[in-house]
Amino acid sequence: MKAHVELCEVGPRDGLQNEKQIVSVEDKLRFIALLARAGFREIEATSFVSPKWVPQLADAEEVLPRAITAHPSTLFSVLVPNEKGLERALACGARKVSVFTAASEGFTRKNINATIAESIERFAPVVRRAHEVGVVVRGYVSCAVQCPYDGPIAPDAVRQTCAMLADIGVDELDLGDTIGVAHADEIARVIEACAVVRPIHELVVHLHDTQGRALDCARRALELGVRRFDGSAAGIGGCPYAPGARGNIATEALVELCESLGYSTSIDRIALGEAARFITGVLAAPPSNGTN
Ligand code: HMG
Ligand code: MG
């Protein structure tokens, strides 16, 4: 039997949070429906962050409950930056939430207005409460290789942030090359450093692709034993607080890579292609300003 690689589709969240135009709720739900049809076990649907910080996802209360109702067998995860975000997510039926911090102080300040230590203090009650109600928690560590404000980041700094998140009880750790600049050797060093906190096959790798090296990084991560990746259909995405960050690694390319190396992903490539074409078309359409 082929070894399995688990792909989490983050397009509806990471893909849409940085777009100039605000995608309608109906188009978000159509995108999610096409992705669900492609067979993703988990789709990151939206964020319960401050709508002032990320207006693109201010409709989370409309999107998440409808996605859950329409696709009961898909796990929809959502970002929550604090207890307020968690309560909003729980009220909408979330079964998995993601807290997010970074290995660099500069990015953490710009992205969530906290130091790394403060972010961990903020997340501790979020993780406790989530676990009380049986909700799984992912912990993202951004800037795993480089920070747009602080420059190169040492693998040991990433390990330290991972260890802090593990100490407060997050269920999984996700390493983000937020600005998409990693070389394969760099991502390998980070993965090896973090393997002392969680076994490599449990780590999630979240690549952006600014320099065209994300697939090399994914290939090296697979060689090292990583079996979980995030991707975004059509490679859309970026973080509004990470200048220069381009799209996520395209999920289609990840599926192709994994399958060409003999892994199974359980993703229907034709259906994924349809989702990618749909969202590309939505984003290419001129924004409606009421005059057309
Ligand atoms: P702050 O301004 O310091 O927060 O922002 P605050 O606690 O002082 O609150 C300010 C206002 O926001 C208040 O409202 C709060 O009620 C409200 P006001 O009194 O002014 O009307 N507020 C909220 N409203 C709704 N939901 C909430 C919430 N929290 C506070 N949850 C805060 C701090 C964390 C809220 C803000 O910085 C924030 O929302 N940041 C999110 C930024 C973000 O979403 N970035 C992108 C995701 S991270 C990423 O993309 C990287 C990743 O993909 C991995 C990788 O690539 O590396 C995950
Ligand atoms: Mg990202």
Image (cartoon, rainbow, N blue to C red):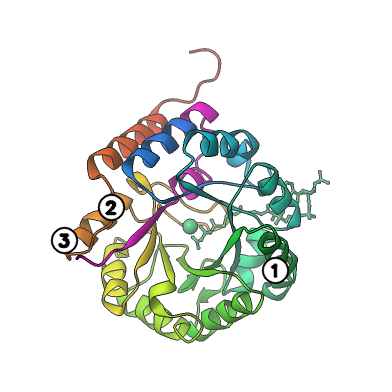
Q: In the figure, 45 relative to 131: above or below?
A: above
Q: Which mark is residue 119?
A: 1
Q: Is mark 2 within 8 Å of ligand 2?
A: no
Residue 13 is one of the magenta-drawn residues:
yes
Amino acid under disc 3: Ser
Q: In the figure, 17 relative to 80: above or below?
A: above
Name the one closer to the observer, 175 or 195.
195
Looking at marks 3 and 1 on the same chain, the residue that comes earlier in the sequence is marked by 1
Does residue 142 appear in this view? no
Under circle 1, the secondary element is helix
Name the one closer to the observer, 226 or 276.
226
Residue 169 locus on image (x, y percent): 63, 73
Residues at circles 1 and 2 in contact by the CB criterion of under 8 Å: no
Tag 2 residue: 266
Tag 3 residue: 260
Structural distance between the alpha carbons of marks 1 and 2: 35 Å
Query: Image quadrant of residue 273?
Result: top left
Q: In the figure, 103 relative to 97: above or below?
A: below
Mark whose residue sits in front, 2 or 3: 2
